[in-house]
Image (cartoon, rainbow, N blue to C red):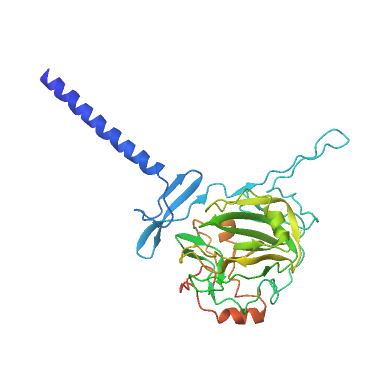
Amino acid sequence: MRSGGVTKVRAAIALFVISMSLLATVGAVAAAPKAGTACKKASTKVTNNGYVFTCLKSGKKLIWSKGIPTKKITPLPTAKPTPSQSGQDNPTPSPSSSNSQSSNNQVTWDWMDNQGKWVANGTPPACTFPIIPAGSLLDFTKPVSLLQPGQVRGGSYKPHGGFRWSAYGTYIESTKISVPFDGVVTVAWQYKTEGAYQFGVNIVNPCGFMLRLGHLRVASPQFAAILEKLPPAIEMDSRESYINPPVAVKAGDVIATAVGIPPPASADAMGTFFDFGLLDLRAPNPVVPADFTSNADARYAKYSLCWYQGNYLSDSDKALVAKMPLSNGDSTSTYCK
């Protein structure tokens, strides 16, 4: 009896220890990591509330990346078409369908998950270089520094680079950003950072180049009309939405009249800056290794370019960019030599 009693006690203790261990594990998984806070093992991934967090090495530290939505792009609701005379509704095209068209029937480009590449929904026209003519996107005499495209910043891989118009902790109110080529707005997003409204857009040239802009702040009336169809801006929720059908825009159309994060934001966040990415959708960037992986979306990371090299900016704008210092002092880049 005594031996049997000891065995039962030991079994009960073992069961208690296992149960507490499981509860601790569940609790650890349930607690959502916070971007920039410490983590323990590099490459560890945790999914929480529709976001994937990755433990990354930043300098000598291990920190959690910004949460990446498990579903990157959320299609916007499309109004039900008016029934035709035959009594049947016209089908609503899928945002990722190769048959999707802009409001003026320009060629658009769609990401095909089953092929892992961008595909044109028609015959693309020839591209005209430079893709961004002199002064067409912004006045390049105004920015004071740049960020390299294709590097880890804030614990996440950033295919895009960017520009700053002010030092950290200061703000310049008026900054005009314009559409540099005829194309279509295919994707947009809006959110808040420390309460400050922010938005971003993807604009696609039918020949196969995509302009990807973020941290825009004050939209022109034309772009405000596009953004009003999106879900409301929520703090740090920068999920993207399809614009269906894509909206045609012209070179010279104003996108935004202010960028970045104004007062009363914290000194670390405040500044006049924006994200600037340029992608060639016709083929993956040949300088990117075939086995390249990151916590960024492959549809952006493998097709992004070093926009200040090559024939993408005008010679005069490239000369201005070449004189700019790096905003964060980090010269590493997947794309730039």
Where residue 322 appears, as percent x and y from the top left, is 57, 80
Quadrant showing the N terminus: top left
Residue at (46% x, 45% y) in the render: 47
Q: Nearer the viewer, residue 210 or 135?
A: 135
Residue at (25% x, 31% y) in the render: 16
Left or right: where does residue 264 sit relative to residue 96?
left
Left or right: where does residue 39 sit relative to residue 272?
left
Question: In this picture, is 7 found above or below 280?
Answer: above
Question: In this picture, is 292 found above or below 78?
Answer: below
Left or right: where does residue 210 sit relative to residue 250?
left
Residue at (80% x, 36% y) in the render: 89
* View extreme (left): residue: 2
Q: Nearer the viewer, residue 221 or 107?
A: 221
Where residue 68 appears, as percent x and y from the top left, is 51, 52
Q: Is residue 119 visible?
A: no
* View extreme (right): residue: 85
* View extreme (top): residue: 1
Residue at (64% x, 55% y) in the render: 188
Question: In this picture, is 127 found above or below 188?
Answer: below
Where residue 249 appears, as percent x and y from the top left, is 75, 62
Where residue 4 appears, as percent x and y from the top left, is 15, 20
Q: Disc count in the image?
A: 0
Q: Is residue 55 visible?
A: yes
